[in-house]
Image: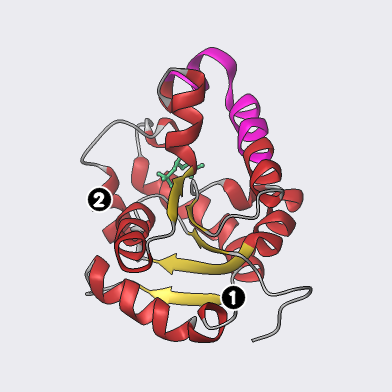
Amino acid sequence: MNFEETPPKNLVLIGFMGSGKSTVGRELHSRLGYELVDMDSVIEHREGRPITRIFEENGEDYFRDLETDLLREMAEDGQRKIISTGGGVVGREENRDLLRKLGYVVWLQAPVDVIHERTSRNRERPLLQTEDPLEKITTLLEKRKPWYAETAHLKVDTAGLDGGELAMGILESARYFFSNP
Ligand code: S3P
């Protein structure tokens, strides 16, 4: 495992909407005890409104600026964390650089049909409130795949595994990282 600079501090989860970042983040938190930062939740809390309303009232670029600000802030913070990101965080080059600086980056992958099934259960994701969410998921995922791939230190196929199993696999792969204080 090659890290560009000093050993990273955090464990960072990236991946498309519905790939299981929040669930795996909670499992990792209960196993490691590190603080869990769910970026979407932090942004919603700070803004005092849900992401759907942030998009509606201020637009996507405003939300993306909030994401970048939060990444910059966390890059300055020395406390070890598990960071669960929003699916679109990899869209900006600066964010991709920040994510790799922040820590060990794990890309959770799920097939399009699984993502569709999981994300159709609620209406919390503004980008999927379209006539054809499956088409939107397919095109957005294809566009983002190279960004996830270039950012991640580890790619994990989530198919058929629950959050606990995934967390254990990630910890096994990240042993080197956790054995370096
Ligand atoms: C987004 C994913 C969402 C949230 C926002 C935009 C995206 O997070 O950040 O709705 O662009 O893929 P989840 O990946 O946690 O659903």
Disc 2 C-beta below 8 A from ligand 1: no
Amino acid beneath label 1: Pro
Name above or below for residue 14 compared with residue 65.
below
Disc 1 target residue:
181
Q: Quadrant of residue 59?
A: top right
**Residue 179 within the magenta-colored segment of the rendering:** no
Residue range of the region highlighted in magenta in the rendering = 53-68
Q: Which of 11 and 95 is in front in this view?
A: 11
Q: Residue 118 carries which label?
A: 2
Residue 39 located left or right of residue 25:
right
State the image coordinates of residue 57 (x, y, percent, origin top left): 52, 13
Say few, some or many: other residues with alpha carbon within 10 Å of mark 2 (under 14 / 14 to 19 / 20 or more).
some
Residue 142 located left or right of residue 160:
right
Say which residue appears at 59% left-offset and 80% top-offset.
Answer: 180
Q: In which quarter of the image is the N terminus?
A: bottom right
Q: Residue placed farthest to the top in the image?
A: 57
